Image: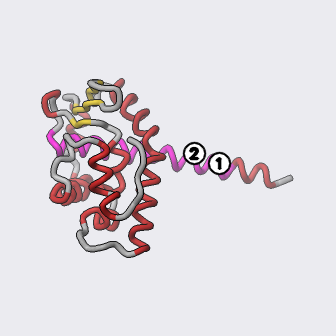
């Protein structure tokens, strides 16, 4: 009978942790847009869903190495990459909600040019500019630079191409767009 309150407490903790991902995803998206030069409609980032697949690589040196290595991956490394893929698939709805929320706050601008893909670019917001000037985001910037050497057209490539380059070619099964 006492198990029920413990379950509820555990659920609350999980909901809190999931909420923290929005902060991580938000600054990752802002750093991504800034460092890819997506500051105008002409240089927009195509398909914000790609953020779900890029976030872990920009947040961790260990995970980034899985995406940029040209050597065959061990079974454990392939397993980790598959876990990152599954996490990204689960994260896509959160990314969509996040993009809507920060667009409403006019931190970014979104244009919907097709059924699946949107075009996103930074707004000219003073607080965002000040936030991104912080040295706290230098590691993400360095990881993005490294990733761009392996996947050079991150800003404009289609989601399917991104999944192919980061996951399929390394032995991880992908599905859908």
Q: Position of residue 91 (x, y in %)?
A: 45, 45
Report the residue at 42% width, 74% height from top. 75
The mark total stands at 2
Q: Residues within 10 Å of mark 2 (few under 14, many from 20)?
A: few
Residue 15's disc is 2
Q: Is residue 102 above or below residue 6?
A: above
Q: Nearer the viewer, residue 116 or 3?
A: 116
Query: Is residue 143 magenta-colored?
Result: no
Q: Position of residue 120 (x, y in %)?
A: 25, 32
Q: Quote the CA–CA distance across marks 2 and 1.
A: 6 Å
Callout 1: SS = helix
The picture quadrant where one finds residue 92 is top left
Q: Nearer the viewer, residue 7 or 66?
A: 66
Q: Are marks 2 and 1 in contact (CB under 8 Å)?
A: yes
Which residues are the magenta region?
9-37
Query: Is residue 22 magenta-colored?
Result: yes
């Amino acid at each position: 009978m006492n198990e029920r309150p413990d379950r509820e407490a555990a659920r609350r903790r999980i909901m809190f942790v999931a909420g923290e991902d929005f902060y991580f995803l938000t600054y990752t998206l802002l750093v991504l847009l800034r460092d890819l030069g997506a500051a105008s409609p002409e240089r927009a980032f195509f398909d914000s869903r790609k953020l779900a697949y890029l976030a872990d690589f920009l947040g961790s040196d260990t995970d980034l190495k899985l995406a940029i290595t040209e050597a065959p991956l061990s079974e454990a490394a392939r397993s980790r990459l598959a876990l990152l893929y599954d996490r990204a698939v689960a994260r896509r709805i959160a990314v969509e909600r996040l993009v809507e929320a920060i667009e409403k706050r006019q931190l970014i601008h979104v244009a919907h040019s097709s059924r699946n893909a949107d075009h996103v670019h930074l707004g000219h917001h003073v607080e965002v500019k000040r936030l991104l000037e912080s040295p706290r985001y230098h590691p993400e910037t360095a990881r993005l630079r490294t990733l761009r050497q392996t996947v050079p057209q991150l800003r404009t490539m289609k989601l399917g191409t991104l999944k192919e380059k980061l996951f399929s070619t390394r032995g991880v099964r992908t599905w859908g767009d």
